[in-house]
Amino acid sequence: MFGRRVNPPSIILIAGPTASGKSALALDLAQSLGGEIVNADAQQIYQALPRLTARPSPGEMARVPHHLFAVASPDQSWSVGHWLRACCTVLADIKRRGRTALIVGGTGLYFSALTRGLADIPPVPLSMRDAIEARLDLEGEARFREVLARIDAAAEARIAPGDRQRLIRALAVAEATGRSLSQWQSDTQPALKPEDWRGLVIEPDRKALYKRCDARLASMLEAGVLDEVAELMAMTLDPALPALKAVGYREFAGHLAGEAHLDEALAQAQMQTRRYAKRQLTWFRNQTPDWARLTQPSAAEAERLIFAPTGRLTPAP
């Protein structure tokens, strides 16, 4: 339908909620564009739980080069900054090879770090974050926002209703460092040049997405997800480690520990997955309003959106 592409972007960002078809779309595009895939999912970094985190299969990874998948052991804790440094190194290598990088995942903070920059904020003690989360639960969001607005009005105004994680982080950073989150962020520079990248968000119909979430959890059980959960449990790791925060892990681990029937564990894991997908939809809707949108993960439509808006797609003669 279309002819020669002119000056394609060197980096394509593909974001969206869990079970939306991001990985399959990225694979199709990578094969079409001669590209390489870079992981932007905080759970797929870890070597544990390949099924539960829906990591690409060995066969899929063999079709095109994949980067930053299963590169950390589950007893490690990668921060956003750690991922960003690793990602920039990978992107430089891909650029030297003259290939297109497709960064795909559902971790919004990774995309924000790439396109807006990452402030060098000192770590907030976990005890302080937990105390602030308890304040939010006790006071309610409206009162919590009043307190935050007096400290950091710009951050409070940017945070969407119901976005607990960002509310807690904004107040925790201000109280831990004595400097507002907005002040820290004002000193940042994006890792990517605006002219080098294009962004796509897969934004499916919510009801259809929830059905896919439920079906995928059920298929994971059939594929042996309980075995990999048992393997991770046997390592007796600190439950605060990120690898043990994978959606569904706690529910299936509870079943294996004799705390719940399998049907109950599955239903709870499905509910938590739907909630996670809803939070992702909300985040990308609020934080990437100028990115192109796809309701279905179609490679042909994705290419049209990536290239056409800037005249980078030319009709065939």
Image (spheres, rainbow, N blue to C red):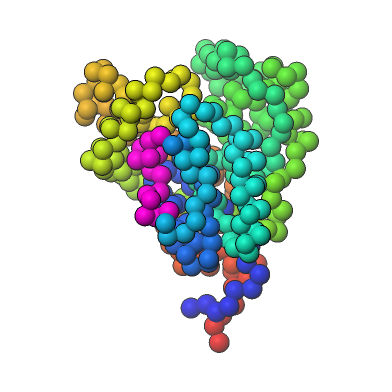
In the image, farthest residue toward the bottom? 317
Left or right for 81, reference 275? right
- Out of 311 and 100, give the one closest to the viewer: 100
Q: Main secondary structure of the magenta part?
A: loop
Q: How many marks?
A: 0
In percent of the image, x 41 and y 44: which residue is there? Answer: 55
Is residue 303 toward the left or the right of residue 144 in the image?
left
Q: Which residues are magenta?
A: 48-61
**On the picture, is 71 further left or further right than 199?**
left
Percent of width and height locating residue 139: 55, 14
Which residue is located at x 53 percent, y 66 percent? 34
Residue 5 percent across, percent down from the top left: 59, 74
**Residue drawn at x 69%, y 43% as measured from the top left:** 116
Residue closer to the observer: 195 or 56: 56
| Residue 92 belongs to magenta span | no
Residue 207 visible somewhere in the drawing: no
- Measuring from the top left, give residue 23's x and y in whole percent: 44, 52
Task: List x then y, in percent, for residue 226.
Answer: 27, 32
Q: For residue 286, what is the image quadrant? A: top right
Q: Quadrant of the C terminus?
A: bottom right
- In which image quadrant can residue 230 be found? top left
174, above or below 184, in the image? above
Residue plotted at (24% across, 21% down): 260
Q: Of residues 7 and 166, which is closer to you in this image?
A: 7
Q: Is residue 126 visible?
A: yes
Residue 241 vs 43, above or below: the answer is: above
